[in-house]
Image (cartoon, rainbow, N blue to C red):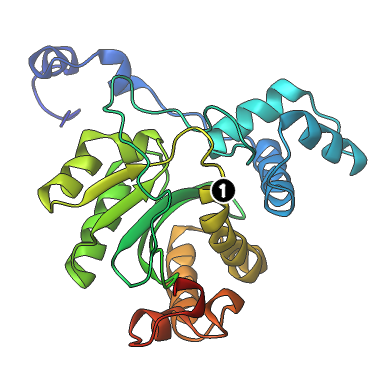
Amino acid sequence: MIDRDATLPVTSQCELLEVARSTVYYQPTPTPQGDIDLMRRIDQIHLDYPFLGSRRIVDALAEAGIVVNRKKVQRLMRLMGLAALYPKPRTTIPTVGHRIYPYLLRGLTIDRPNQVWCADVTYLPMAQGFLYLVAIMDWYSRKVLSWRLSNTMDPSFCVDALTAAIDAYGAPDMFNTDQGSQFTSDAFTGVLNQHRITISMDGRGRWMDNVFIERLWRSVKYEEVYLKAYENGTQARQGLADYFVFYNSRRRHQGLSRRTPDEVYHQTEPLPQAA
């Protein structure tokens, strides 16, 4: 919106657009390579032991010969969107003043595709830098319906993934997420309300629901991301596109009676555990 080559000074353009000049001149500082390497080690520890908090991650790093203070580990975990999985009052930071949605899955029998969808965001390390990945998943079949990458935690890439999933598969009856700011934003909940999708959000004591999609992240990272060490976003998009085709159509799941997500999503007979 700001044209530095225009005859109108940048100061005047900022006044007309009601934006601060500091936002125009600010150049983001790249994350130091040392922090990127440390973030990858933290992410690997979290995948192997998702119940470890920052204190015990510091201990695990020390055992590997990496001495770092807890405050730095906490800062990097916040940047990565990581939190230990265990019963606690709150694991994510919701949008300030957002509407509180109830948790609706307690006691609910989920026995068909498109009954309940869920979503989550994870951190993806690359050779240089990192990205964030959001996935929309069908709860019953484990099928990844859509996904998007972003270099920020802005809600827009989550909204884009949600819209793509609805366009491709229709609207589910219910959508369940945690109370992270991406999912409590007006933009995201607005799409759900527009399609009359019932909104359910994890609350106190619902930490086990995060374990469900953590299995997806573990598979994605150990079977694809860490093996490829993407150099850039283009490689990441192509690699993940190929992997999710494999995940949906060829990767058999023990929890799905050795069937693939595509087979279960398009099946006519219910799963044994859903009966």
Viewer-closest of 21 and 269: 269
* Closest to the observer, 7 or 66: 66
- The answer to which quarter of the image holds residue 126 is bottom right
Occupied quadrant, residue 35 = top right
| Amino acid at dot 1 | Met
Q: Which residue is mark 1?
A: 208
* Quadrant housing residue 237: bottom left
Instruction: Give the vertical position of 99 relative to 210 (above or below).
Output: above
Location of residue 132 with respect to 218 vertically, above or below:
above
In the drawing, does residue 258 fall left or right of residue 2?
Answer: right
As helix, strand or loop, the secondary structure at mark 1 comes to helix
Question: Measuring 36% from the left and 79% from the top, which residue is drawn there?
Answer: 265
Could you say which is closer to the camera, residue 83 or residue 243? 83
* Left or right placement of residue 178 versus residue 224 in this view: left
Q: Position of residue 125 (x, y in %)?
A: 59, 52
Q: Residue at (29%, 19%) from the top-left corner?
A: 97
**Is 156 situated above or below 238?**
above
Rendering coords of residue 176 (x, y %)? 36, 49
Report the quarter where the C terminus lies.
Answer: bottom left
On the image, the x and y values in percent for residue 158 come to 32, 49
Image quadrant where one finds the N terminus: top left
Judge from the rendering whether residue 196 lies leftward or rightward of residue 164; answer left or right. Answer: left
Residue 123 visible: no
Q: Residues within 10 Å of mark 1 (few under 14, many from 20)?
A: few
